[in-house]
Image (cartoon, rainbow, N blue to C red):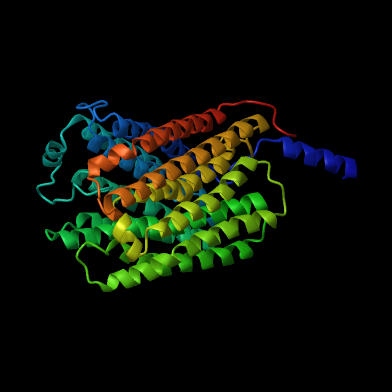
Amino acid sequence: MSNASAAALAAEQARAPAQIKYRSQAVAKPYFMAAIGLFIGQILFGLIIGLQYVKGDFLFPAISFSTARMVHTNLLIVWLLFGFMGAGYFLIPEECERELYSPKLAIITFWVFLVAGALTIVGYLGLPYNVLAHLTGNDLLPTMGRGYLEQPLITKVGIVLVALSFLFNLSMTLLSGRKTSISIVMLLGLWGLAIFFLFSFVNPNNLVLDKYFWWWVVHLWVEGVWELIMGAMLAFVLVKVTGVDREIIEKWLYLIIAMTLITGIIGTGHHYFWIGTPAYWQVWGSIFSALEPVPFFMMTMFAFNMVKRRRREHPNQAATLWALGTGVMSFLGAGVWGFLGTLSVVNYYTHGTQLTASHGHMAFYGAYAMVVLTMISYTMPLLRGREANSPQAQKVEKLAFWVMTLSIVGITLFLTAAGATQVWLQRMSSTPLSFMETQDHIMPLYWARLVCGLGFFSGLMLYLISFFVTGKREA
């Protein structure tokens, strides 16, 4: 073949629609679509909460603050789980170089999880919580009433069954295919997620033990096994968009997960400071929590180092931006803001203030929301038959990135100021104010937080719109 013919063939192949490598990867698409839809719902209820902070009777009694908060946090967990599952169904077949074990089972699992989640939210909104508990068997095995784990018993059982189906599907795919560090770390994190969720069924009568085991779900998810999932997803995308040797990325991944497990497991102790556990947790919890920013800093260095060493300019620049943003924002939110209140001598004053909320908002967005959006940004064009969205669509998506990210930074800063004011006026002043008097002083900060929340919602809408923007794709 002549050079001209070869060049023409290469140009024709470049213009041809990109295809996913394995047909069964397409089952990830409904999971990602559901994740985005539930994300929108989560932010809508976040705005309701923000309004109820400044207008206490907003939507009352139809939607109380406790109900809105419960829906807000539960939607957060559920949409991230949909994102993780979609990522697993896309990532594992490609890493294992074989089709998914059972695409049909994956679709059945999707509908079961979606319907169960929707019915649970309807239950929260349509019934008093004690009535919902009675109707769903909480008298048989009490598991309800704890933050993030408010789901009825029947929903928790459903989550376990969905997780087992999901993990069976992925594990069978992995066992009969190629094993890579990325797929093994991803599956290890997903199995850890399911195993630690089982502690949601442990509900001792002793309040100290109840809180002790409750953190085995909440902390060891977000500061333990979820970080493994995050690292695997970030590594997968960086392999694809940078072309850097897999061996280099895998070495970084091993270092990150080692530091994650070392600091995260013992770092659970920073939740044991004031709940009635032995005093030695104030030492161990402080020391290992102080080290928890290290793996997040390593993720930041990892992302920027891989992009700097890239061997190709991937057309999906939006996905690259999300990957870099994940590293930076997870370090700031989970690392820096997590450290602000984690030492026992500091936590004595900051515990239960808006400083905790400031850390939670930036950490969840920076570490987990952004890595799921990174995965969606990379995979959705492929699932729709192209390597990347048009430059016009990517321009809208990049704008969405900046609007959402700057808005969450604003939310974090205003909540940090509110928390610092609480500490000063309510806990350190020589003439401390009551809780409600303090709230009056920080009301302007709540209004500012609400404005930033509206900004975040507009950014999320831009992100959704970017999927429907058409334009001429680069040749």
Q: Nearer the viewer, residue 296 or 140?
A: 296
Q: Residue at x 72, y 54 (%)?
A: 311
Do we see residue 306 in this rendering? yes
Q: Hey, which residue is sitting farthest front in the picture?
A: 430
What's the residue at 42%, 66% (across, down)? 290
For the C terminus, the quadrant is: top right
Q: How many marks?
A: 0
Residue 324 at what x, y percent from top left? 59, 50
Residue situated in front as seen by the camera: 226 or 34? 226
| Residue at image coords 63%, 38% | 388
- Looking at the image, residue 194 lies above or below residue 67: below
Image coords of residue 278 (percent x, y): 22, 71
Q: Nearer the viewer, residue 50 or 379?
A: 50
Say if residue 177 shows up in the picture. no
Residue 246, compared with residue 391, is above or below; it is below
Residue 256 in the image: above or below residue 475: below
In the displayed structure, 3 sits above or below 168; it is above
What percent of the width, then of the height, locates residue 318?
A: 61, 40
At x 24%, y 44%, the residue is: 435
Q: Is residue 12 left or right of 419 when viewed as pictured? A: right
**For residue 50, what is the image quadrant?**
top left
Point out residue 4 in the picture as x, y percentages from the top left corner: 89, 40
Which quarter of the figure is the N terminus placed in?
Answer: top right
